[in-house]
Amino acid sequence: MSFQWSAFTGVLPLLLRAAMLNLELAAVIMVLAVAGSTGLTVLRSLKVSPVNTAVDLVISFVRGTPLLIQIFVCFYGLPAIGLNLSPIAAGVLAIAANSTVFLGEAMRAGLGTINPGQIEAATALALRAPVIWLRVVLPQLFRQILPILTAELTIIVKGTALLSVITVVEVLRTAQQVGSATYRPFEVILAAGLVFLCINLVIGTAGRIAEARLAVGRG
Amino acid sequence: MNFDTSVITGHLPQFIEGIGLTAEITVVAFLLGYAAAILLAMAALLPGRAPGLLVSGYVTLFRSVPFIITLFIVYYGLPFAGLRLPAYAVGTVALGLNAAAYYTEVIRAALLAVPRGQMDAARAIGLSFPRAMHLVLAPQVFRTVVPPSTSVTLSMMKDSAVLSSITVPELTYQGLLVQGDTFAPVEVFVAVTLLYWGLALLIAGVARRLERRLSRTHARTQRFSPLAAKYLSLEWRDRPA
């Protein structure tokens, strides 16, 4: 067997088109995860015992089980309790839940780096809780966890490849279809790898630029 | 909806076999990945720019490509190199190489965190390079390396579920087989999930014991004023009165 360049280059346009779906899904999931983890953090800060116990249990569960299984649970398990989701919806739900938990834990750690004096000052100025969150805590928190946000976005992009197992026709699924039709699975899967490599290199670079800019802003 | 426990009890041997293989794969891939990572992290310290760039390239490559794709690349690629290995071996090696990229980062960061002066001082008082490495650097690196290595190992254990896609009969694969037999997804995934969860807790527990042994010195925890804790702490169990 020898490597066939034409099989490799020939499939690239098709994969790039499929990559649009991965990017779209990743964008939606990222927005959901950032919103979800922010909400989760504020919720946990209220320190309602039963709520936090439940949240901790969910976090431990999500962190202790594979993303692939969570995707299967959303796709095969939820219909059994009457919730029928399309493959895309099930996949978005699973990855978003997973990332919400991971970003939530990052935010928990990030809170520790904020100077307590600021909260005391804000309270002394009679700022109300929503204002303290929106104007004092969250802006710093997001800046603090920016590297983690970029890392999570690449994790999300990689996660979208797993949706191929529940029949979402994204890059990997497209590659598998072409690979089995042409009997050149290796060249095609290599091309799929290249597509993900490029996407994540761009995300990584953009993240570093953003970090550098915000670091300047911090003075 | 009725929860049919017989689906779980009836296929218990299959689930046990699955989690056993998952645990085995995790251990082998851990050893393989860590050995590779130590070599890579050391190689990055070699003089000249090339070694550092090559190691960074390795890390970036594995971190940017989804593991499921890396796995298929290795799976389809080995025959090109004239190698035919069983799926189990291919999967474990791919998993180890993937984790090696993350372990390398962990080790490199830990090495960089040790102040340069310590190595210089150790050498100045007459320790040879290997002895300085062994007596001065290694204990500190070992301590900082454990917590992040644990989270990499946990991710790796979870990534092993992807090996089901190349027919390695680990836990996820067994779960899918049982589901095909019984059409009882809820029961199957409850069982599979609990087993993964248990294994994850086990790994985390072992790591915590190791961590406690290594760091006898008490870690300083930040104490917030009650006012600041309202926003900056999520700890709700033992609130100061």
Image: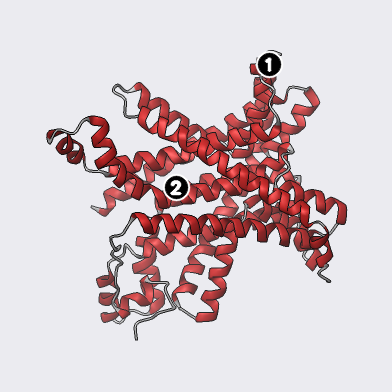
Q: Which residue is mark 2?
A: B149
Q: Is B28 left or right of A110, judged from the image as shown?
A: right
**For the residue marked with disc 2, what is the amino acid?**
Ser
Q: Is B9 left or right of A133, judged from the image as shown?
A: right
Q: Position of residue A195 (x, y in %)?
A: 59, 32
Q: Chain of mark 1?
A: A
Residue drawn 62% across the image and 48% down it: B23
In the foreground, A35 or A112? A112
Residue drawn 57% across the image and 50% down it: A27
Mark carried by residue A6 = 1
Q: Chain of mark 2?
A: B
In the foreground, A63 or B126? B126
Mark 2 lies on a secondary structure that is helix
Q: Residue furthest bottom?
A: B241
* Residue B74, above or below A56: above
Q: Is B13 left or right of B218, judged from the image as shown?
A: right
Residue drawn 49% across the image and 56% down it: B206
Q: Position of residue B221 (x, y in %)?
A: 31, 67
